[in-house]
Image (spheres, rainbow, N blue to C red):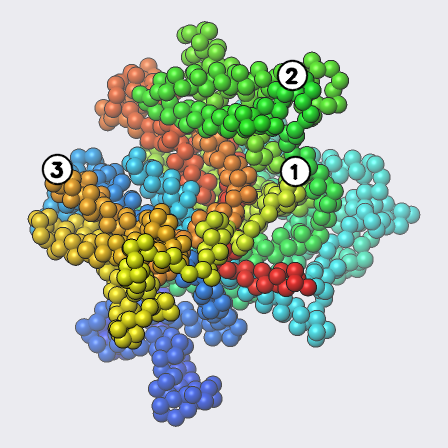
Amino acid sequence: DAPYVDMCGKVCDAIFFGNDPDNGLGFLGIGPFATSIVEVVTIAVFTIDYILRLWTCDLESPRYAGFVGRLRYLPSFYSVVDLSSTVPFYVDALSPNISLEATQFLRMFRFFRMLRVEGRYTEALTLFDDVFREQKHVLGTAGFIGCTTWVAVASLYYIAERRNTDMIYCPDPASDCEEGIDDMSGVDTGLCVIDSWGLVDCTDAGCPPSEYKENPCYNVFNSIVSASYFALLNLFGEFPLIDQHSTAGKVVGTVTAVVAVAVFALPTGLIGNGIENIISRRREENRALEQSNGTGDAENGEAPDDWVDVDASEYPADDSTFGGRLYNFLEARTSSMAVVFDWFINALIIGVILSFAVDTLFQENDNAMYRLVIDNFEFAVVCIFTVEYVLRLVASDQNPLYRGLGGKFHYLVSFDSLVDLAAFLPYWIQVWITGTLIPHNANAIGSTTVRLLRLVRILKFEQYTHAFGYFDDVFRMNGDLLAMTGFAALVVWVFFAAALYITDRSNPDPEMAGFYKTVPDSMWMTLLNLSGESPLCNYSVLGKVLTGIIGIFATALFGIPIGILGSGFEEIIDEVTEETPDEEIDEAIKSDGSAALIAEASVPEKIYNFTNGLGSTASLWFEGMVYFLICLTVFIGIIQTIEGKEDSLSQVEFLAVLMFTVEYILRFIGASADPNYADIGSPFLRRLRYVFSFYSIIDLFAILPYYLALALPGGWVDAHDEYFRMLRLLRLLKLDKYVPSISLIDDVFRLKRQALTVTCFAAGSLWVIFSGLLYVTEYQDDFNEIDEVPVYGCDEDCTMMDRFSNYFASAVYTCVHLTGDYPIVTYSFWARITCVVMVVAAVGVVAIPSGIVASGFMEIVEERNKAQGVEQRGAAGDDWYEWRLAELQNEDPPASVFGPTVDIWQRKVNAFLNGDMSVVPHTHVNPHTFERGSRFFRIFMMTLIITNVIAVLVETVPQIDRFVGNERGNFFDVFEAFSIFFFTLEYALRLFSAKKNLEALYSPWTYATTFFGIVDFLSTAPWYIEQILIACGMSENSDTATIFRVFRIFRILQLEDFLVGFRKIDNVFRASKDVLKATGLMALIIWVGCGALFYIFEQGNANFRECDVSIPLRTSNSTGCYDFDSTAECVSYYGKGMCEQTSFVNMPDSLYYVAVFLGGEWGVVDFTWGGRFVCMFLCVIGIALYSIPVGTLFESFGSVIGMDGEEEEDQEDEEDD
């Protein structure tokens, strides 16, 4: 229970820990439990402190004066914190029947006493109060959308996974299963049986029921309640069970990753955005205050001039002295030879990095010549770096900052000097220790560390970008905010680490308990949770509650200081880099290659207009047909990768290829009239130019393999048909011709080239350095075990050193970590420290280049839309419904065709249902009675909706469902029939009164076909359909009946009558449709393209292969499980079912994984090298581009629900002026 205590014995325990009852402090008589001197002294200080604070609390506030005021002080925040810090000790000491562990949770509140260090630190926690107060009008709407999405996703997962045996989990197999089964790896869940109630029997798997546990194993999706935790993790963007989902579960997971995550992120995004706005506002207020007091160095929030590094080349020294000439040669570089020497040093730096990386590939190479070359190169480089440093030190006094003895010391501790020293000084220390001028033990950790430090020389390129020099500026500009938010984040980190330590240190799952066996261990996993990661999921009930709270609230607070570092760095980059001239932006907008209608004077010109959708309705239909065929053939190409579906829809594919062929011929003929080739004189050369154009090559790749396979059956093309099928997916790129997206990327790089140069250097340098650090800390880690990775040379008993066998492998995992994701958590101590630094300091900086690309893309798309005259009628996202509603606003409802009596009743019913007393016609009923009855009915219906949702949730719990039973007339059936009566009655009344309902546009059809009517219909229709099916013979215990019952959960959408939410979603999509067309197409191309690449590279990856236990892993005749190049070959040799590929089995499966990857979650990472390159592409740029549509939706949501109301008012005022 106390692993660190054994290292120091009873004396140490008596002083610090207090875990050993025999530590010698029993004479104090403080209860039956142990204590420590530190604990006793702490309690004494806290007690005296609290008494004094209680005595003087009236000085803090007049409301605490007197006896009653003291009572009012007791439940205040800091009073409760203080009491929680001390009372548990006295309870433990005085009551022999209370366990120390029972009150240990309360002791954690001592962490919040840290906030008393300085009052300003509490401001970080009060940010939430400010955010809720400022955005309360939109948080309710976003919260309702988020909760409804959560319930919906959990329900879908329950339906999809409740029969999936791969989702069976046994919390304590060591105690509940047969001897020899110590963890879940020993339980074959495929042998378990799930009964009709959803209860699991794993007797055949070695985990039978016992008198203590009726069900030692269970399906983690056995109820909507249980599924809700995992759905919540998925909605955070985390998929800890990514490779265990069934096909239906993967479909739900894909929809969740692509759509639901964006919708669920709205409330948390609003909180984060609100915090950022408040911090930005406070920063501006502080700057304004400093300027008004004459203490600020900046004007208008800009960095002071003296914060920017001075370029030495602009201030050369006196060339008449040796020192001056040396300075001009090394620093100012005033001659061509100096420039050549500078590039020589730069080449050596790159050579050092490459030699270190390449040498990690051949650590076991004992070839004398190889080692001679590498070691002598290292020695020569160190000598050159040493001489260079000495000369720079000699010449440093030419710089006024480094003159004199103090100046020399100032130079020694400068950034550049420390970088230079790190490159050679450790080598000479190693020489001094070993007594060998050229150390030869390259595999020793010390030797590797020495060589690793030379990678720091990459920071010498800082002289060209000044990227890291701006960090100092960031800390100066945001020092107060970083101190405030950083301290609060530290408190939150420690608090939740201690809380999870208490809830899960005794978790029956040994893996879970291992990560929380001590508070320091808990801090590692809690840090990942606070950074938005959830690599583990089998928590205790309290642990799940805590991690849920972390994901929803604490993550936003913890991410503030990291966000401040990143945004501050980006702000300074924007200030110091020149903006791209408007002319270049305009040129990027104009040069989009859009087709333009040309005067019809010849056949080629007519064909050109026709193929580009210009000049006639027929051309528009042709263009639309091509668009449809592209999407259809891409879908066919995806389906044909599924086993047994290789020839599905082949006739449709043939017709599509013929159509694409005709299209290509027409485009070839019309190319001579293409205005883009107007500078080419000959029509033949114009057509030839088209043949080698981007879109022509795509067309040829998409159609030629089909004809080659037909012409040469059984040939090379036919043998590699699965790869050529993937070329058909390139047709997606043709859509870029109609909706420019990918073709805009080069415009983005031109627009943001200066900022990208600086930030990419910073990100790349951090990547190089942290890759080396992770390699050094893990390449000899043979303690932390991992799954088999045969592709990396380990078939069994694998450890982390098999993953980090060389620098290049480390670079891939580091790249993933620098995106903020941690699919690997079993690191050694020093590797964890490295990862902590990455999370805190590097992740925000590395994300800046991709963020700049994303913002540049958005900027160009928006400017293009403005240039094309895209206008918006009414408010953001308005369409025909809002326009018609505005038109009817002042009109009276039409009279009923059935006469005045029906007309009056329609008015009454409408007023009763909607609580609008202003439209109640004259009636003999007392208006107050009518109003109370309407209010009661509305409250009753809201209560009925909520209780229905709760009933569905409870009914899915297997134990409760079995207790109630499925006999007709059980409680749930009666309650359902009761609810259906009122839901049906309400739906009928709303249809009846729609003629008088303005929101229904005075039309029953409009009501029935809009959001409200559809939801009301769906709340009743499934019950009636279920009753009809049961009457036709369907069993009430069948899966179909269960699905119908679960779909009642969507009655939660009826709360839309009381809370505005989903009715605005379609407005959100309309408000952002112009940007979504470009960004959505780009996201689709990245998704499908990377899915195809992962499928090609990973479908045969042995790291994702499982074989029957009868198949050996390796054999001498290459027929072992891991000997085959692909899983298909293994299946062909041993038979179906003997070998199985667990991931990237086909294109739909690959698209599921990539959808998760693009959300920033890397559930699997042990790729082949082809997959690794795709992985790094997604990390560097793909994820940022893919996330643009999500950001667009968030901005549009804020606009639609009124977050930008103040800005709109300002714009209206300007227009009025």
Which residue is at a point 24% across and 38% down the rendered structure image? 164
Helix, strand or loop at mark 2:
helix
> Label 3 belongs to which residue?
1032
On the picture, is 835 further left or further right than 67?
A: right
> Label 1 belongs to which residue?
747
Q: Residues within 10 Å of mark 1 (few under 14, many from 20)?
A: many
Q: Are marks 2 and 1 in contact (CB under 8 Å)?
A: no
Q: Nearer the viewer, residue 889 or 950?
A: 889
Q: Nearer the viewer, residue 219 or 35?
A: 219
The quarter of the picture where the C terminus appears is bottom right
Which residue is at a point 45% across and 11% down the rendered structure image? 709
Which residue is at a point 71% across and 38% down the rendered structure image? 587
Quick check: 938 above or below 260?
below
On the picture, is 885 further left or further right than 954?
A: right
The quarter of the picture where the N terminus appears is bottom left
Q: Tag on residue 603?
A: 2
Quick check: 1108 above or below 752?
above
On the picture, is 184 further left or further right than 111?
A: left
Q: Residues within 10 Å of mark 2 (few under 14, many from 20)?
A: few
Helix, strand or loop at mark 1:
helix
Residue type, mark 3 in image: Cys
Task: Tell me which numbered mark, 3 or 1, is placed earlier along the sequence.
Answer: 1
Look at discs 2 and 1 and give the one toward the viewer.
2
Look at discs 3 and 1 and give the one toward the viewer.
3
Percent across and percent down for residue 612 are: 59, 26
Percent across and percent down for residue 361 are: 51, 30
Which residue sits furthest right?
320
Q: Quadrant of residue 595?
A: top right
Alpha carbons under labels 3 and 1: distance apart: 63 Å
Residue type, mark 1 in image: Asp
